[in-house]
Amino acid sequence: MSTLEPLEQPAPARTDFRLVPLALAAWGCTLAVPSLPPLAVGIGVAALLVGAAIVALLRIPRHKPRLAPAIALLLLGSAATATVTAVQVASAHSGPVPELAAASAVVTAELQVRSDPVVRSRPGSQRPAYVVLKAIVERVKSRGTTAEVHTTVVVTGNLAWKQVAVGERVRLTGRLAPTDPGDRVAAVLSARSPPHHLAEPGPLDRGASQLRAGLRAAVDGLPPAERGLVPALVVGDVSLLPPEVVEDLDTAGLTHLSAVSGANLTIMLAFALGLARWCGLRSWALPVLGALCVAGFVILARPEPSVLRAAAMGLVGLAGLATGSRQRGVPALAAAVTALLLIDPWLGREYGFALSVLATAGILLLGPPCTDALARWMPRWLAAALAIPMAAQLLCTPIVALLSESVSLVAIVANLLAGPAVAPATVLGLVATMVAPISVALASVPARLAGFAARWIVEVATRSADLPGASLGWATSPAGIALLVVVCVAAAALAPPVLKRRGISLALAAAMLLWLVQPARLIGLGGWPPPNWIVAACQIGQGDGLVLRAGPGTAVVVDAGPDPRAMDRCLDELGIKNVPYVLLSHFHADHVDGLPGVLSGRKVAEIGVGPLDSPADEAAAVRTLAAAARIPVNRVQVGEQRQVGDVSWTVLAPNGHVASDHLPEEGEGSVENDASVVARAEIGGLRILLTGDIEPGAQRALLRSGADLRADVLKVPHHGSKFQDPAFIRAVGARFALVSAGEDNDYGHPAVSTLGLLESAGMTVARTDQHGESVVVLTDAGATLQARHK
């Protein structure tokens, strides 16, 4: 027996939480103060200061010498944050601009653009796209009075505003509208004129714009998804990111990759400082280089609040990586939160700030114990790769659910798989950005390599989002979110002891995998679609997207809705891989913008369109997309008869000539609606009348033409608009009516009067806004209508 006594193991260092109450109190002040009257805020601040003074004078027991300073610091910090927040709220919502906004005044303003213009459009809307940007009003004139100001506003305008640059000074005429008291911007300025140029951007803004433009030029040769994702990863430029990729990233729990985050800066700093060390840089030069990199990142990604937040969180993350100590990481995070809220109290009311803080806290607090637990039965590097995204995702789950009304069940796995590609894509994209001013051709080399890494991220997001059980719908009521918080807290507490046990961990992983692959069977529901379906109305929002089954895995698609992602998913769920024919009733966005989703991964042989190439932009986009895919686009003719597999159809309207100056007799209003292609299809002996968006004028014209309108299934015209001709509806005599409309749409579709008309005509109605996807099923007993309730 050895006579040597075992050395006493030092106790593990305890995490320092002393600054956490201060950060939480400061955060609470930023949330509460904007909603309180100034008098209440003043009384509260005075009470906090008095409390701090009393605590400082109290006799504290000797065994707790740090208690009084900690409480005093908490009270003083709360008073300071409340004061700063109150001052900034008062400053933002006082002065000439907010006063003019309250009166909805028309003004002439001179302003400096402070954010890149973003083009927005409402899915399924026939309204033109518009531009949104942030700006600082420097001079405002209204009712003969001119004032010098410095007030932040949001500007909305037509597409002419797409050309303005950050830092540029412009003049415009527009109408002001007020914002909420808790908003960081003082007003919304709706431009009534194009921007009139006054001055060029400063050198820093101009340089940043040139670098961002250089990166966009360098990635120009990449496919659309990669072309959009690389600038988003590097500088937060999401202008090129396709909407369907954004949705996939959201479903897969990878949303943080499409916006500037602390991870971006951490990766860039780690690369820059590592390269500097390799080059021999030491001592004070490294912190100086780090500071310059942070400043350059902020300028390049634009000095907006989200970027400043990302910079701070990135520095905290880098400090954690450098020290490897959560004992230092937690107080650093708390100090960063407090400092950021003192500098910019508005951050406390932003979801992005909450996500950044919670993700960092999860990595610092939950990451190490989960890593230690998993490392008991797997390599430590793999344990860390699993534990870190799990920890970050778990703490962020309630906020993500509040924003998306769902809980991602694939987020941890998706982050694990995508993680190795994030750093290469970011670093190579940064190299391309720096090289582009010298040579775009040379910059395209690292850009193309970054594209390969981005392709992997896109594949992970797409395939994860396509899993049937990828996300679970969740109520966003206070009770629903509170329940989710309790679940997440319990999961965080149970995670380390559970993950220590290999058997339990593998069993849970297997159960999750089964849920993702076959969730319907696990909860005892039949699969979708039901056997022997013949026609389906896809749930694609406010628009039309119908699928006529022509055989196994084959269908004719009639209209493609407004959303490529939703249309693609509907076809995937229906098992459609081959689309011999696509019929576009007319070129409104809610019928054609989802066409990329139809083409995604499917063989499409032909596209049929009506006689009117209007709206011109949408028509041109369809033809460009078809040309790129080498798909012929042909105009249909009245009387034309076609057959594809089990589907046959006859074109009933419109005639080959539609006058451009024709006005509908009544309705919601457009020549394009009445020029919709109308066809009568037949599958298995059942007739389906496809009506596009025809309104009463075109409906009566069809009746007068003597066309045979009798059908078993009616695709209700124009999403169930209130403008319907009763004689037309009765002449169809259908048993089933399919209404394709978006939930809570702005148009009031379907109208109560139309629903009453359909029911009085003896039709059973299925509407996608309430029932989800709907199908007509043909069985030996006859036809039935089934809906996939949401």
Image: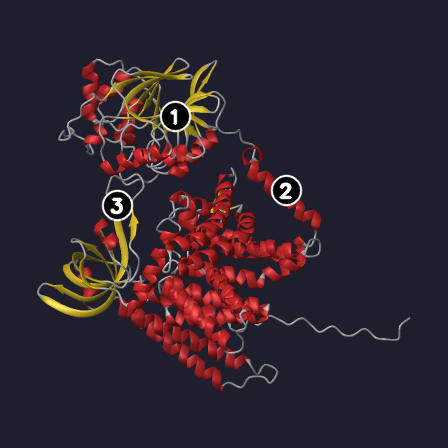
Q: Find disc 2 in the rendering and name its residue.
A: 510
Query: Residue lying furthest right in this view?
Result: 1
Q: Position of residue 687 (x, y in %)?
A: 35, 16
Q: Amino acid at mark 1?
A: Ala
Q: Which quadrant would the C terminus be assigned to in this image?
A: top left
Left or right of 501? Residue 312 is: left
In terms of sequence position, does the residue under pointer 3 or pointer 2 come before the other?
A: 3
Q: Find disc 3 in the rendering and name its residue.
A: 129
Spatial CA span between label 2 and label 1:
41 Å
- 659 or 375: nearer the viewer: 659
Query: Are the residues flagged by discs 3 and 2 in contact, CB closer than 8 Å?
Result: no
Q: Position of residue 774 (x, y in %)?
A: 41, 28
- 65 or 235: nearer the viewer: 235
Question: Which quadrant would residue 667 be assigned to in this image?
Answer: top left
Q: Residue 605 has which mark?
A: 1
Residue under the image location 51 percent in, 41 percent down? 463
Q: Amino acid at mark 3?
A: Ala
Spatial CA span between label 3 and label 2:
46 Å
Residue under the image location 22 percent in, 29 percent down? 612
